[in-house]
C-alpha cells in the first residue's frame, strides 16, 4: 500500500480542500485492483500552517 500511495502522489493531481488557521487539507484519489473489481483509494493529507511538508492523515477505500 505504501508503494501504491507513493506512486499515486507523484502521478496524480492533489485536490485542495479547506484552509483554516490549522493549515490546508488535500486529497489524492487513485484506482487500485481490489479482490473482485477496481476500487478508488482516497488519501487525505494536511500541511500545517507555517509548514511546507504534507503528512498523510487518512487512507481508505472509497465507496462507489
Image: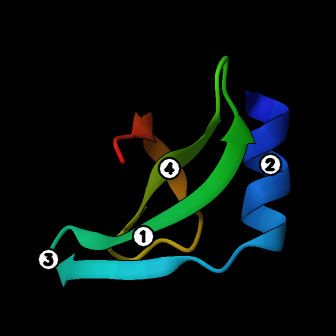
Residue, disc 3: 21
- What residue is rendered at 54% in x and 44% in y? 41
Residue 2: x and y in percent read 75, 31
The secondary structure type at the circle numbered 3 is: loop
User: Crowdedness of circle 4 by 10 Å Cα count: few (<14), some, many (20+)?
Assistant: many
Mark 1 vs mark 3, CA separation in Å? 15 Å
Question: Number of labelled discs?
Answer: 4
Residue, disc 4: 43
If you read the primary sequence from the N terminus, does the residue marked by circle 1 or circle 3 appear first? 3
If you read the primary sequence from the N terminus, does the residue marked by circle 1 or circle 4 appear first? 1
Asked if the residues shown at circle 3 and circle 2 are in contact, with their CB atoms under 8 angstroms apart, the answer is no
If you read the primary sequence from the N terminus, does the residue marked by circle 3 or circle 2 appear first? 2
Q: Is residue 2 visible?
A: yes
- What residue is rendered at 48% in x and 50% in y? 42
Mark 4 vs mark 3, CA separation in Å? 22 Å
Q: Is residue 59 visible?
A: no
Residue, disc 2: 6
Residue, disc 1: 26
User: Along the horizontal axis of the image, is 49 left or right of 7?
Assistant: left
- What residue is rendered at 65% in x and 80% in y? 13
Amino acid at each position: 500500500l505504501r508503494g501504491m500511495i507513493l506512486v499515486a502522489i507523484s502521478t496524480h493531481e492533489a485536490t485542495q480542500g479547506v484552509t483554516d488557521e490549522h493549515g490546508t487539507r488535500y486529497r489524492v484519489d487513485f484506482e487500485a485492483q481490489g479482490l473482485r473489481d477496481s476500487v478508488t483509494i482516497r488519501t487525505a493529507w494536511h500541511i500545517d500552517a507555517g509548514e511546507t511538508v504534507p503528512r498523510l492523515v487518512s487512507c481508505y477505500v472509497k465507496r462507489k
